[in-house]
Structures are given as structure tokens and as C-alpha cells.
Image (spheres, coloured by chain):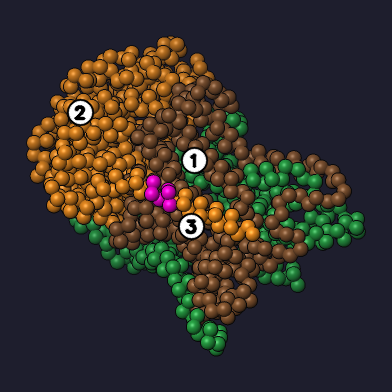
Chain colours: A green, B brown, C orange
């Protein structure tokens, strides 16, 4: 690794200096809190005694918190709801993003600048505020989009209503990612296809889409990560209807444990379990997609 | 994660940055269907904002008693803005200022941290480089909510909760920014230029500032704006960290107006007006920075 | 070539950032100087004997009452903050206590007080409040005095009452129901007369509302003997109440969307909902909820289970507490006492926040001769409240983990409304969740 030239030796401390701020921040705000959460997950709060407890102390709880977490049916229902929601948001976001990107790239499409910017703008609207705005649109009393005829908070509809807010905020960003990849393709690719009499649709299907697959994969990863961490949308929509419970998705359960019931120990144990699962899922997906892409490329 | 790097390898041929349609020599017919579909998509994206715009024109008494589609034309918006400005001695404008402060300062500092790290990862071979890069990328996977409470408890030991620093510091580390900066440095800062500088006797620090940072400039603007949005949109961290309402950013402030407390009327007309006012400056920022806010750079394509 | 303008722009951005920094620092400066945070205040007392106390409260307009205190007490300045409301403030207090940087004083609803005491968040202020407690009757003190120790100064009492749209009752030819049987019949009759209107809505979002109704029926969710607790959330009176409302909901006689949502605000404004079962603090809230209906509401006693029984429950009501983190409990207790027992302070609270005072003398203040601004049509408003206040009953004591119970209510009843489940089953799951949590925390449950 190290180059044996004098310059390299002279500079060997400098890269460490450059990465030092990031490493310090990472240690202080990711590693340390993560480790602390792990520590908390093995503890539990107990009252000191007497009717009112007389204050509390923490005790070592071993794996008791984990046992409770894994045996909590509400958490698992939350995981199922999260997966259902993800089954809507991930394909919808990625496919819409791909669609818009492809449309933007068609020669002869007008209003590109303004539509591109408009579709991108929701990305700059905080999730809390986006959920609030859509909430008003869903409620029968204030809905300009037919909320008095359609129940947006019905048992099935609620997944689409919550998912819609997430899709709304994410499509634009992903569209730009894919569009950029499209713009980077050499135009000669299509010219020869056109000479062979290929239609625009065939060019899209046979050339453009396969060529931007790496960008689509990246978007899918982003969207999957967001789906695993869904929180703001259901949490903001919760007080508007009876449809969203306080443990509707796993992160809401953690929030409710930590902030509602002030039980950071259970929240920590749930967090550890979910983070481990998220790591497995993400690495698994990344691996899978990667090998698929390599196969196709081969 | 390596899949991400795939996109950065693609920029070849057509420039990745040209937004205007290619001006072909022969006149092209208008692609009506794609245009219509895009307009539909754009409509979908502005509908909620339009509703907020209409609702914000309605006075408190009219908000829930008049037709939802029709804006009020009787200066309701002016009154609402005045009410919002009067609320707790204009605390809303404090929130707005706070949001800009957190997002601007946090964005600048986070971009610098990312630039330094990305540059080092791209331009130096040093022990532990790959391990460091992979660890940083894995940081994307930790949900913020998992870290929020431990962060609060640890920061309180340092006396930093309920302070500007308590909100800023945890947001300076940005794995995605570091990833982008590494790509930018790889593609925009040629090794030969650095070598030439070294031969001329320039120190590594000077090379980083005058060659590295300068050449990564356009990319850094993008990293800054991405981080600006991330901090602007952040709700949970400031919500957990802050207890003084005069330090709230907009997200937490508007949420506190909305969830005013159990058995308390929410101040909907204030929330709606506040929402409108909070969306407008970001739109303005985007439009005005559009020239050098190159959204295409989010993929790491720097040419 | 483009490097220079870009740099200039960057410089502009940096200048902008620096400007913002200065602006915010300037704005925050005044605040941070006066903030009482542990060490700060200790240093403060050393220099000149001036004490600054932080006070968390979410009442709109409470700042005007605090300003009155600050004007009269230069040595003890109170700085107000509104970090969150109601139950969310409780969570914030617990987290802040965990980090040892809570406020000095905080508004706490009665139902959350035992939980905060059990976690050691709220301080015992018995020694500083010997005089203050004599200004309350025993029934009121029960909410803040546990095992002989004072943990808070009661601010208001909130008997549950029936608020109704007098204009619409007249329009539809309805009479104000005196019993729950009347109420059910009226609900049905209204549906026949005006298919778009409902007598009321069942609120699964606010547990305080339902507990008030259960209290009226005689429920005792928590009771104590010695150092041991008895939890009985699915007791017979509660099941009676749940069964009654389930029938109304299943029969389609009442609406079932949550209160305090935009949807509900609209219904309250446009006359879709004819009544609101609420605490005596409702007038202040109605102004925000349904501003278009000023002067159209009246208050009446809550319908009774047996005709003529004046018993009612409570919804809300709060105490001013001093936290165990406060380095100045004596001064903090002095403020809390002043806020809730001083005639001028209580008068201001009635005027600004429409509280119905908890202090005995407070209930005879001249300011209560006038109706709240939103009820100009009912000059005897407070006389009505005064009539029922003595017969308002709460549980013998609120549980130490009431948040678990309340989350159970919100989730369980919302689910039952959403998918047609049984209210009684929801009560059973609230009972088991509450018991499990109390045992986990180490309380003695008998």
C-alpha cells in the first residue's frame, strides 16, 4: 500500500488529518450512541419501593427485554404493515421515477424544465409538513379530491394514503438520479437503432432501460432503506383518524416506548433487533441485485 | 453499495449536464403524450401546495365553514400572516430563522467534512482506507430514531442539549455526502495535477485547498444543498434535543402548533399559514440557485 | 473563468451564513442569559441574589399571567417555555430528568402526576406549601397530595359537562337530555330528522374523555391499600359505559371520528355535531375549534345514569409542579402557590385561559360573575359549573403508568371503531397491558 517514495512518507499523516473530523463525528454521534443503546437494551428500570416507587434505579435485565420484544405480537404486526407499505412505496417510487425520467428523455417532449423542477420540489418539503398537507386532502371535511366519497383511511386504503405521501416526496429525487444516467448515454446508441427502424418504445425498452439499470438499482436501495425507516408520515397522520395506531410501524413502536411510555430500555432492545434485521436485509438486497446485474452484463 | 458506483462510471458521450433539449437540425414533432404525462406528474406534485395556498387565504372562521376549493378574497391571508406573526411575539419568524441557521451552517460544515474525507479516501492510499469507507457507508443503515435518545443522553452529559450545537453537531456527519465527494475527487481532481504541485513544493494542505476543493467546487454545492435539505427537513433530532421553543426549527415549531396538547384546540389556520410560508422560501431558494444547483450531480457524475 | 464568480457567490453565501449566525446569536442571546439551567442559576444566586426559574406550560396566553408575576418579583424571574403539550410534555420531562436538566416548574395534568412522582421527576414540596394547602378543599387536594406529601398545586378542576348547540336543538325541536337513556333516544331522533347531523362523536383519540365518563358511572381503575395497588380497568361501571357507547356506534346514532382533528373542527363549525361532552375548560377551546359558532352554545349537566343524580367525572385539570432538578424548590413553590391561589393571578387565569379555579376562594371571584367571552348568551355559565363541581368524582388515585393504559385505549378503541371490534375486549387488553407494565416496573399489585 504505502509508496516507498519520500513524498509519500512525508504525506502519510495528512490523509488521517483529513478524515479525522469525520471519524470523530462518526465515533461521537453514531458509534457511541449505538453502543450506549446496546448497553441500555440489557437494562431495565425498577422502582425503589413503596406505593409511589420513591424514584427508580436501573437493573441488569439480561436478555429479558429481547425476550419481550421478540414475543410482542404488536411489533410483528407492525413489521407486516411496514412490509405491506414498502410493497407499495418501493415499486411505485422507482417505476414512477423511471417513467418520468424516460419521458423527460424523449425528444420532442415539451415543458421539460418546469415539469422536472416541479416533480423534484416535494423532496424539499419536510415529511411532517407533507403528511399534514396530504392529511387535509384526505379528510372528508376538507378534501378537494373526493374524500367525502372515498374513505382514504379505510382498512386497505390507509396503506395507499400513507404510501402516497412517501412516494410524493421521493419520486422527484429518484427521477433525477435516473434521468442523469439517461443523459449520460451516448446518442449514437439510438441512432443506429433508429436506422434499423426501431420505434421510440423499442429503443426505450431494449436500450435505455437496460443501460440505466445501475441507477435504478441505486434508487431501489435508497427507497428500500426509506421504507424500513418509515415514521414521519404515519406518525403525523395518526391523530386524524382511527386507522393508524401508535405502534403502526416498528419505528412508531420504538418512538412510543421511548417517548410515550418513557421506557428507553425496551426501545433500545427493539432498535437493536430492527437494526440488525435492516443490516441483513440491506446487505442481502445489495448482494442479490449486484449478482443479478453482473449476470445480465455477462 | 458498490452498485452505486456503477452510475458514476457511465458519464461518457453526451454531457451529463445539458438540460435543454438537443437542438437537432431538423424540426421535431411535439411528443404530446409524454408531455401530457409529465404535466400530470407535475400536477400531482403541486396539488397539496395549491390546497395550502387556498386554505391560507381563509380566516379562522372561514377555514372550516366554507367550500374547500374556493379561496377567500378578503385579505384572509394578510390577517393570517399577522396572527401568525403575533403568536407568542412572532416566534414563528424565530423558527424560520433557526431553520435557515441550522441548515446553512450545518450544510456548509457538513460539506467541508465530507469534502476532506472524500478527498482523502480518493487521493491517498492509507492503512484502513477501505474499512473506513465501508463503515461510513454502513452508517446510512442506522435509523435516526434509534440513535436519538442515546444521543440526547450522551449530549446532556456534555451539557449540549437544548443548544444550537446539540442540533448541529450530530448532523455534520453525512455518509452520502462523503460518498459523493469521494466520487467527485476521483473524477475531477487529476493525480497529475497534484503530482505537479508536489514537485513545485506545495504542501499537502495547500494542494487540498487550492486544487482539491476548487476542482470539487460544483460538486460541493450539490452536497451542500442536499445537506441543507436534509437538515431543513429534519424533525426528530431537534424535537428530541430541544426544550426551549425559541430554538425550534420550523418542523418542530409547526408540529408543536399542531399537537398543541391533549384536549386543546389545534391552531389549524396558523399551522396552514405557517406551512405555506415555510414551503415558499425553499421553492424560492431552489429557483434562484437553479443555475449552480446541478441536481444531476446527485449521482456523483461530475464532468 | 467561471471560478471567480463562483467564488464570489460562495463568499456571498458565507457572508449570508455568518449574518444568520449573528442574527440568531443575537436573538438567542437574551434568552440564554436568563435561562435557568442548573449551574447557571446557582452562579446567578451568588451574584446579587436574583433567581431565574424556567416554567414549562402550554396554556395559550399564560405568558400574560407570568408577566404579572415578573413585574412584581424582580428577585425571582420566571422564564416561560412551551416545548410540547399535555402528555408529550410529560415524556419530555422524564427524558430531561434522565439527563438532569429539566425545568424548575411544570404544568402537569392530574392523571400524569403519580407517574412523574414514581419516576422521581416531581419534587415533594410539603415544606414550602403549609399555607397554600389550606386554600383547597380535601377533594381537590386528593389529586396532588399522596400519602401526606404535596407534589403539586392544583390549578383548575374540570368537571365533565354537556355543551350543546342551543340554536340547533331549537331548530330540530330537541330537548336537552337529562339521562343517558334520553341521550340515546335524542341521538336516534336527530338522525331521523337531520340525516347529515349527529348528536356527538365517540372519541377514541382522547382517553381523558372516556375516563371521565367511566368515573361518572363509578369506575375505580386504580385504588390503593397501604403500599399495594389494585388495578381494575375492566370493572362493571366501565363495561356499562363501554357497552352503552358501543350500542350508539353500532346503531349509527353517533359519529365515530376522533375529536380535535380538522375533520371534527369542520363538523363542530358547520353544525354536523350538536353536542360536545367536555371539561369546564371548553369555552376557551371552542373559540379555536369553531369560531363561527360564538354565542350558539350552552352548557348543561352531563346526562345521568339515574335521573337526578348530579355525579359527573372529570376531564383534565392540572397542577403546577416543581421538579426535583430545580435548585430553587422554595422559590419555585412560591411561584406555583401564587399562580393558583393569589386572587389577581387566578382572576387573570380565568380571563386569559378560562380555567375554572381549583382554589376554594378562587371559585367565588367576581370575574366568574361574567360568562366566558364565547358564551355571551349564558351569563350563568360559571354558576352551572359551580353547581356540579362538588359532585365531580375522579378515581381514588391515578395509576403510575397511565401512559400505557392510555395508549391501550387509543389503539384498542380506534381499532374497534375501524374494524367493528368489541369495546369490552379493548378494555380487557388495557387491563392486562397496564398490569404487566406495573409488575415489570416493580410495583406491588394486589
Q: Residue furthest right?
A: A196
Q: Which residue is mark 1?
A: B278
CA neighbours of label 1 inside 10 A, class few (<14), some (14 to 19), many (20+): many
Q: Quadrant of the N terminus of chain C?
A: bottom right
CA separation in Å, label 3 and label 1: 21 Å
> Is residue A153 shown above or below B221?
above
Q: Element type at marker 2?
A: helix
Q: Which residue is mark 2?
A: C346
- The image shows residue C137 at horizontal and vertical percentages of 14, 31
- Would residue C113 appear left or right of B96 to someone viewing this image? left
Residue A195 visible in the picture: yes
3 or 1: tag closer to the N-terminus: 3
Which residue is depicted at the point 63% across and 57% down? Answer: C2
Q: Nearer the viewer, mark 3 or mark 1?
A: 3
Q: Which residue is mark 3?
A: B108
Which residue is depicted at the point 75% across and 60% down? Answer: B14
Tell me the chain of label 3. Answer: B
Q: Element type at marker 3?
A: helix
Amino acid at each position: 500500500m504505502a509508496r516507498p517514495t519520500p513524498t509519500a512518507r512525508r504525506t502519510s499523516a495528512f490523509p488521517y488529518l483529513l478524515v479525522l473530523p469525520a471519524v470523530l463525528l462518526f465515533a461521537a454521534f453514531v458509534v457511541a450512541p449505538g453502543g450506549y443503546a446496546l448497553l441500555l437494551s440489557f437494562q431495565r428500570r425498577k422502582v425503589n419501593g413503596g406505593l409511589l416507587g420513591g424514584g427508580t434505579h436501573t437493573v441488569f435485565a439480561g436478555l429479558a427485554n429481547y425476550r419481550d420484544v421478540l414475543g410482542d405480537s404488536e411489533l410483528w404486526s407492525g413489521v407486516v404493515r411496514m412490509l405491506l407499505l414498502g410493497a407499495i412505496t418501493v415499486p411505485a417510487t422507482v417505476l414512477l421515477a423511471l417513467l418520468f425520467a424516460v419521458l423527460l428523455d424523449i425528444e420532442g417532449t415539451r415543458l421539460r424544465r418546469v415539469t422536472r423542477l416541479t416533480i423534484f420540489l416535494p423532496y424539499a418539503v419536510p415529511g411532517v409538513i407533507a403528511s399534514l398537507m396530504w392529511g387535509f386532502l384526505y379528510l372528508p371535511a376538507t378534501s378537494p379530491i373526493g374524500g367525502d366519497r372515498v374513505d382514504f383511511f379505510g382498512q386497505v386504503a390507509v396503506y395507499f394514503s400513507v404510501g402516497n405521501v412517501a412516494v410524493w416526496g421521493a419520486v422527484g429525487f429518484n427521477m433525477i438520479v435516473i434521468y442523469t444516467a439517461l443523459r449520460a448515454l451516448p446518442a449514437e446508441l439510438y441512432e443506429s437503432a433508429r436506422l434499423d427502424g426501431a420505434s421510440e418504445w423499442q429503443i426505450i425498452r431494449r436500450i435505455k432501460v437496460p443501460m440505466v439499470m445501475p441507477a435504478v438499482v441505486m434508487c431501489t436501495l435508497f427507497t428500500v432503506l426509506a421504507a424500513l425507516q418509515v415514521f414521519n408520515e404515519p406518525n403525523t397522520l395518526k391523530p386524524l383518524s382511527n386507522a393508524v395506531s401508535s405502534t403502526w410501524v416498528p419505528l412508531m413502536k420504538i418512538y412510543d416506548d421511548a417517548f410515550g411510555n418513557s421506557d428507553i430500555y425496551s426501545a433500545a432492545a427493539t432498535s437493536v433487533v430492527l437494526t440488525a434485521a435492516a443490516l441483513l436485509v440491506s446487505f442481502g438486497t445489495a448482494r442479490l441485485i449486484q449478482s443479478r446485474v453482473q449476470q445480465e452484463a455477462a | 453499495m458498490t452498485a452505486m458506483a456503477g452510475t458514476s462510471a457511465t458519464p461518457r458521450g453526451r454531457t451529463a449536464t445539458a438540460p435543454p433539449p438537443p437542438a437537432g437540425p431538423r424540426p421535431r414533432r411535439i411528443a404530446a403524450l409524454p408531455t401530457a404525462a409529465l404535466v400530470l406528474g407535475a400536477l400531482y406534485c403541486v396539488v397539496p401546495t395549491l390546497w395550502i395556498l387556498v386554505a391560507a387565504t381563509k380566516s379562522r372562521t372561514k377555514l372550516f365553514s366554507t367550500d374547500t376549493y374556493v379561496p377567500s378574497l378578503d385579505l384572509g391571508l394578510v390577517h393570517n400572516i399577522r396572527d401568525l406573526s403575533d403568536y407568542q411575539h412572532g416566534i414563528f419568524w424565530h423558527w424560520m430563522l433557526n431553520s435557515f441557521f441550522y441548515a446553512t451552517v450545518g450544510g456548509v460544515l457538513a460539506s467541508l467534512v465530507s469534502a476532506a474525507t472524500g478527498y482523502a479516501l480518493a487521493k491517498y492510499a492509507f492503512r484502513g482506507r477501505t474499512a473506513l469507507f465501508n463503515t461510513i457507508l454502513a452508517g446510512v443503515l442506522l435509523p435516526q430514531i434509534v440513535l436519538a435518545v442515546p444521543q440526547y443522553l450522551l449530549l446532556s452529559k456534555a451539557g449540549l442539549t437544548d443548544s444550537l450545537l446539540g442540533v448541529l453537531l450530530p448532523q455534520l456527519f453525512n455518509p452520502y455526502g462523503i460518498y459523493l465527494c469521494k466520487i467527485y475527487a476521483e473524477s475531477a481532481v487529476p493525480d497529475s495535477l497534484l503530482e505537479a504541485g508536489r514537485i513545485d513544493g506545495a504542501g499537502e494542505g495547500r494542494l487540498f485547498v487550492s486544487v482539491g476543493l476548487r476542482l470539487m467546487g460544483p460538486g460541493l454545492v450539490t452536497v451542500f444543498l442536499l445537506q441543507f435539505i436534509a437538515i431543513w427537513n429534519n424533525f426528530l433530532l431537534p424535537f428530541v434535543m430541544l426544550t426551549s421553543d425559541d430554538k425550534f426549527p420550523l418542523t418542530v415549531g409547526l408540529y408543536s402548533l399542531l399537537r398543541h396538547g391533549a384536549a386543546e384546540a389545534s391552531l389549524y389556520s396558523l399551522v396552514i399559514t405557517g406551512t405555506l410560508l415555510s414551503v415558499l422560501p425553499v421553492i424560492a431558494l431552489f429557483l434562484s440557485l437553479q443555475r449552480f444547483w446541478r441536481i444531476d450531480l446527485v449521482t456523483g457524475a461530475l464532468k | 473563468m467561471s471560478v471567480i464568480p463562483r467564488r464570489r457567490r460562495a463568499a456571498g453565501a458565507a457572508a449570508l451564513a455568518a449574518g444568520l449566525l449573528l442574527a440568531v446569536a443575537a436573538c438567542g442571546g437574551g434568552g440564554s442569559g436568563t435561562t435557568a439551567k442548573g449551574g447557571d442559576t446557582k452562579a446567578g444566586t451568588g451574584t446579587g441574589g436574583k433567581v431565574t426559574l424556567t416554567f414549562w406550560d402550554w396554556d395559550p396566553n399564560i405568558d400574560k399571567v407570568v408577566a404579572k408575576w415578573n413585574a412584581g418579583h424582580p428577585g425571582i424571574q420566571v422564564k416561560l417555555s412551551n416545548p410540547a403539550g399535555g402528555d408529550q410534555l410529560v415524556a419530555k420531562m422524564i427524558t430531561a430528568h434522565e439527563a438532569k436538566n429539566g425545568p424548575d416548574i411544570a404544568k402537569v395534568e392530574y392523571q400524569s402526576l403519580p407517574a412523574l412522582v414514581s419516576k422521581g421527576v416531581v419534587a415533594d414540596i410539603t415544606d414550602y406549601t403549609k399555607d397554600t394547602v389550606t386554600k383547597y378543599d380535601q377533594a381537590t387536594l386528593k389529586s396532588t397530595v399522596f400519602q401526606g406529601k404535596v407534589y403539586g398545586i392544583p390549578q383548575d378542576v374540570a368537571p365533565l359537562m354537556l355543551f350543546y348547540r342551543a340554536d340547533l336543538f331549537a331548530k330540530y325541536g330537541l330537548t336537552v337530555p337529562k339521562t343517558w337513556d334520553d341521550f340515546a333516544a335524542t341521538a336516534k331522533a336527530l338522525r331521523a330528522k337531520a340525516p347529515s347531523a349527529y348528536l356527538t362523536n365517540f372519541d377514541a383519540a382522547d382517553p381523558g374523555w372516556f375516563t371521565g365518563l367511566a368515573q361518572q358511572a363509578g369506575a375505580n381503575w386504580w385504588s390503593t391499600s397501604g403500599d399495594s395497588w389494585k388495578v381494575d380497568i375492566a370493572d362493571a361501571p366501565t363495561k356499562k359505559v363501554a357497552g352503552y357507547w358501543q350500542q350508539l356506534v353500532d346503531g349509527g346514532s353517533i359519529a365515530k371520528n376522533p375529536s380535535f382533528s380538522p375533520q371534527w373542527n369542520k363538523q363542530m363549525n358547520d353544525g354536523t355535531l350538536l353536542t360536545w361532552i367536555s371539561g369546564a375548560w371548553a369555552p376557551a377551546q371552542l373559540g379555536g375549534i369553531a369560531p363561527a359558532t360564538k354565542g350558539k352554545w350552552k352548557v348543561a349537566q352531563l346526562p345521568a345514569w339515574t335521573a337526578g343524580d348530579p355525579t359527573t367525572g372529570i376531564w383534565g385539570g392540572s397542577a403546577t409542579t416543581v421538579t426535583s432538578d430545580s435548585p430553587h424548590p422554595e422559590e419555585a413553590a412560591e411561584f406555583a402557590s401564587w399562580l393558583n391561589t393569589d386572587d389577581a393571578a387566578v382572576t387573570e387565569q380565568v380571563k386569559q385561559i378560562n380555567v375554572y379555579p381549583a382554589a376554594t376562594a378562587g371559585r367565588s371571584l367576581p370575574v366568574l360573575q361574567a360568562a366566558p367571552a364565547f358564551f355571551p348568551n349564558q351569563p350563568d355559565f360559571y354558576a352551572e359549573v359551580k353547581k356540579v363541581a362538588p359532585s365531580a368524582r375522579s378515581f381514588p388515585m391515578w395509576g403510575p403508568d397511565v401512559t400505557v393504559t392510555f395508549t391501550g385505549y387509543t389503539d384498542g378503541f380506534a381499532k374497534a371503531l375501524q374494524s367493528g371490534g368489541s369495546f369490552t375486549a379493548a378494555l380487557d387488553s388495557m387491563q392486562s397491558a397496564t398490569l404487566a407494565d406495573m409488575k415489570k416496573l416493580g410495583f406491588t399489585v394486589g
